Amino acid sequence: MPTTAAPLVAAPDLISELADGPAGTGGRPVVLDVRWRLVPPPKGRKPRRRPDPVGEPDFDAGHVPGAVFLDIDTDLAGPPGPAGRHPLPDPDDLQTTLRRAGIDAATSVVVHDGVGAGDGMAAARAWWVLRWAGLAPERVRVLDGGFDAWTTAGGPTSTESGGARTPGEIAITAGAMPVLTADAAVDVADRGVLLDARAPERFRGETEPIDPVAGHVPGAANLPAGSLLDGDGRWRAPEELAEALRPVVGEAGPVGAYCGSGVSAAMLVLAAEIAGVRPPEDPVALYVGSWSNWCATKRPVATGA
């Protein structure tokens, strides 16, 4: 019986699922390793694609046997620009990537990051992208606590690539999760609740380490994504998440989430589903371009709490 709330999977449960062979073989779940860390560009330089994925060295040093590495910056997002630092990926490119990972129409997928440096945000974004691509809610899970939880639970690791993987035949249906534009974010802030997942000091405009302008979208409320995890990097219990979310999400009408570039805000979308505050068929909408897009369009900026 699962020991965590959907769409999470606990490390001991995943270890059991993979006990008879590597991930992605023999009907076992495909495991996508999306370890990543937010590395701001040098001061004064515009964001651009990095030549080398920042999480790949961690993957090469040891990963879940049979796992496939995907890069948040290049595999699960489009090129940075006015649309944001992590805009939506091109559907055809994403389909090719997922097929290369061995994903079929009925494949179960588990995504994970390392948690430590990434705070769970990369796994949440990967989960969201797969759901946006049309994978059914029951087919996409997040490893609670990430790779750290896997190793702590005694999960085996490998440094092998896994060899040639039989390509999958997944046909994605882009647009299965609600997406906000900048104009739609304004409307949500006016008629419902627009949540900002960034750290409080970034929300208040006291500091901005990445984007050219500090502050937040007028009318937004701050709910830092980091507050959704416990001290071990695992998701807080569903009832705790519900307690944090219901006062702002409950009967608010339309609800949206944003952050710096649409990565950590995916944690708010995921948290609402874990908590049962929003069902899979009515998720919180994600402003994918987030603050990086808002700045690029030179829109009004609010500061303070």
Image (cartoon, grey):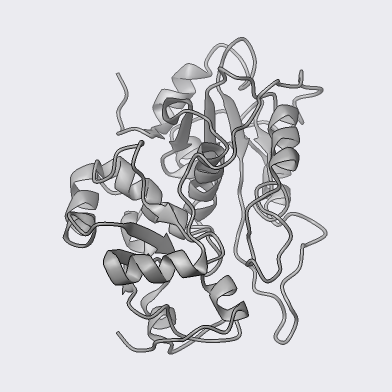
Question: On the image, which quarter does residue 101 sit in?
Answer: top right
**6 above or below 237?**
above
Q: Decide if residue 190 is on the left or right side of residue 140.
A: left
Residue 181: % across, % down = 51, 63
The number of callouts visible is: 0
Residue 270: % across, % down = 39, 46
Residue 123: % across, % down = 52, 46
The residue lying at 74 percent from left, 39 percent from top is 92
Viewport quadrant of the C terminus? bottom left
Q: Nearer the viewer, residue 265 or 35?
A: 265
The residue lying at 40 percent from left, 87 percent from top is 302
Q: Decide if residue 158 is on the left or right side of residue 302.
A: right
Residue 303: % across, % down = 38, 89
Visible residue check, residue 210: no
Visible residue check, residue 50: yes
Q: Nearer the viewer, residue 39 or 265?
A: 265
Question: On the image, which quarter does residue 163 sit in?
Answer: top right
**267 above or below 155?**
below
**243 above or below 217?**
above
The residue lying at 70 percent from left, 75 percent from top is 41
The residue lying at 49 percent from left, 43 percent from top is 146
Question: On the image, which quarter does residue 273 sit in?
Answer: top left
Q: Nearer the viewer, residue 256 or 39?
A: 256
Viewport quadrant of the N terminus? top left
**160 above or below 75?**
above
Q: Nearer the viewer, residue 90 or 303?
A: 90
